[in-house]
Amino acid sequence: MSGEGFALELRGITKRFGATAALNDASLAVRSGSLHMLLGENGAGKTTFLNIATGNLQPDTGAILLNGQPVVWRHRADALAAGLSAVSQHFSLVPAMTVAENVALAGPRLGAKYNRREAEDTVRRIANNVGLDLDPAAMVGDLSVAAQQRAEIVKAIARNAPVLMLDEPTAVLSPPDAAELLLWLRGFVSSGRTVVVITHRIREAMGYGDEVTVLRRGQTALSAPISSTSEQEVVAAILGATDTGPLAFARQHSTAVRQTLGTSVLALHAASVIDAGGARRLRTTSLEVRGGEVVGVAGVEGAGQYQLLRLLAGRISPTSGRVTLPPSVGFVPEDRHRDALIADFSLVENMALRGIEARRGVMPWAHVALQVQSAITAFDVRGGDVRSTASALSGGNQQKFVLARELADAPQALVVENPTRGLDVRASQEILTRVRDSAAAGSAVVMYSSDINELLATADRVVVCFAGEVYETTLDSDAIGRAMVGVR
Amino acid sequence: MPTAVLDGFLEATVRSATPLAFAALGELVAERSGVMNIGLEGAIAAGALAAFLGAQIAGPEIGFVAGGVAGALVAAVFAFFVLALRSQQIIVGAAVSMLGIGLSASIHRAMVSAGASTAQVQTLASLPVPGLSTLPVVGDALFAQPISTYLLYFLFPLTGWVLYHTVFGVALRATGERPLAVVAAGHSAAKIQLAALIFGGVLAGLGGATLVVAQTGTFSDGMSAGRGFIAIAIVALGRWTPRGVVVGVLVFGAVSALQFLAQAMAWNVPYTLVLASPYVLTLAAMAIFRGSRTAPAALGQPLDGGL
């Protein structure tokens, strides 16, 4: 097969991190002058793909072809020199510098002179040429998210890069800003450049792209021109065949002992969240969670579930509106290593972290040690005793310990975020069963999971976050999957 | 105030400011690249000893250069631990500080007891600038100085020009703000920090060298006298800009020169209090100009692996 007509090709790429393969024989072929949309669930390997294409990561096997010619990137500078620019999900701009300085930073030669006026003229010229509105003298930190993104794009194309890759560029934008960007990208490719856009939003892909590639679990699940495929086909490729599997276990296990629903315990009243950067993360949302029920939350990354869960856990305050919280809420954040446990602390010390802000005076270590002992017994935490460090436990046992700690004072509500992340099937089952048990004991439970099947197995009802909006769907994997990508 | 006293005071101000200016300018560059090098004191001490030895062997000019080389070597030790081994900047800095002070004192003592060292070395000649040195009030203080002081008059604007008018300067400042952005642009953050640290080491070493070959003509244990730490404070007070640092070193130079004034005017204040004034000023200034938001955002943070 000749690479003619393709600006960028990734062939048979495999990349392993430890025991897991992020990419497994995945391929991508981007036609010159096209807007190519790369879709897939969280963890499907999209960002790894981008990192390999731009020289941030080396593939274990597979080839990269640029305009049909095989290339090897030793590091990022190689890919940049060859004209492959990327705008990453987390902007690589310096907030305390002007737009012009940030663009100059991307210059190939460090020895070059920096003339403020010339640099600003250059930025103005590029921005005008490609039709982007940008003030070169503005401090990046003062710009809106959308303007920062325009600065990133100008920086990326300042070297006249023929191929531009953007990782979820619309995730941080408001819908009008997102539409404006996509429209601009359409015009940009019509001038002969090639663009790859990673997105979660299927409507964007169908509405603005020329071609689409779908990654699922590190493999290419679909690759087709947008005109010859359909929304259904793309959704099916993203989600894969639904298998209920062993996850139904958790639901069967404890629905039998479920009580009738109690009163409203947790509630949002027209609450919204605007982050420090001014981006609206959660639109005006009302939600009520009653004692005894598990409300599942679904959503692709950055859709607002992060803020929703932290509002319900009392970790952040709404920008407007109100939140009703019970006296005690247990919270299990997604990243237990970063947010829930201190790896080098003993289990006793980790236990003491809950409610530490309200404690005064001498630490009642003996009492805390008893709490740990009963948590270990009640939740069957194996591999360590009271004095062990958290790092001595396996991931599954760490998570059981975190859950036990959050439930130690029998809170009226429990908020859990991807509680089975990184756990095997057995540990996942145990955790989900405990979550359901907590609801059965009368708690109001909110659970976010990136795995739809897990939600179906555990939740009584499901709400979906999409672009900061929250709405309820039926308990059906198709309906949830569609709602997650904005199809209602 | 008699003219002679004023002249003496201004001259003492510039003399006290010179070593601080070298060290603070070097530290300014290191900190703008994101590295807090509190090992400066060690580089100053090493620079002073190297200048002393170099001046004995080959005259004060070579001694001055030797001071810069010694400062670079001390900075290289710091850079090895911080950049290659990713050790904590503060801990390595403290260790390098003490190492530089201790090692230079030990070497000096060993050479004295072996009879291999003289007590005094020749100092750099004062080179009055024709015309400028006859200016009223500031003429002598600014323009009847040894070559080392004139070097500063070039280094400050040159450093400012590199920081703000070259792509390297933009990249260096960006490294201090957000190393990831520099790496994303295809440059090496570690190499930029290495360059900044070595530059800082050379300047700290030259600062130490001026204590010997431009001022006292001798070496004594502990002659760096906390100047490295004062230089670090000056960088913060100067808001991490060359201009601010110039103002800072002059203020500190003037306060140090109070000793001269106290003697000349026969002030009835305890001498120890006058000696302590630069350090008291450091604390006072830190209390007054607190909560600065202009510090480089990534100052003191180790680079992530792979940068």
Image (tube, coloured by chain):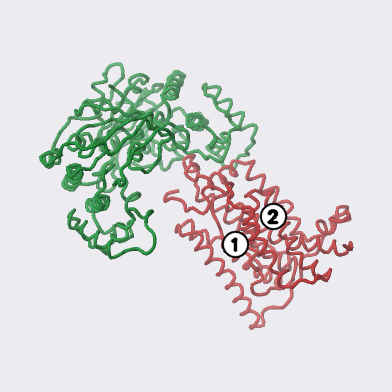
At x 44%, y 59%, the residue is B85
| Callout 2: SS | helix
Quarter assignment of residue A457 = top left
Identify residue for label 1.
B40
| Left-right relation of A141 to A467 | right
Q: Is residue A22 above or below residue A158?
A: below
Identify residue for label 2.
B248
Q: Nearer the viewer, residue A404 or A159?
A: A404
| Left-right relation of B288 to A297 | right
Q: Colour of chain B?
A: red
Q: Nearer the viewer, residue A297 or A96?
A: A297
Q: Nearer the viewer, residue A247 or B183?
A: A247
Look at label 2 and name its amino acid.
Gly
Look at label 1 and name its amino acid.
Leu
Callouts 1 and 2 on one subunit? yes
Q: Position of residue A72 (x, y in %)?
A: 38, 39
| Callout 1: SS | helix
Q: Which mark is residue A120?
A: none
Quadrant holding the C terminus of chain A: top left
Q: Position of residue A129 (x, y in %)?
A: 54, 22
Q: Is residue B223 above or below residue A228?
A: below
Q: Is residue A252 above or below residue B101?
A: above
Q: Would you say residue A25 is visible in this rendering?
A: no
Q: Is residue A316 above or below residue A123?
A: below
Q: Colour of chain A?
A: green
Q: Nearer the viewer, residue A469 or A445?
A: A445
Report the number of discs. 2
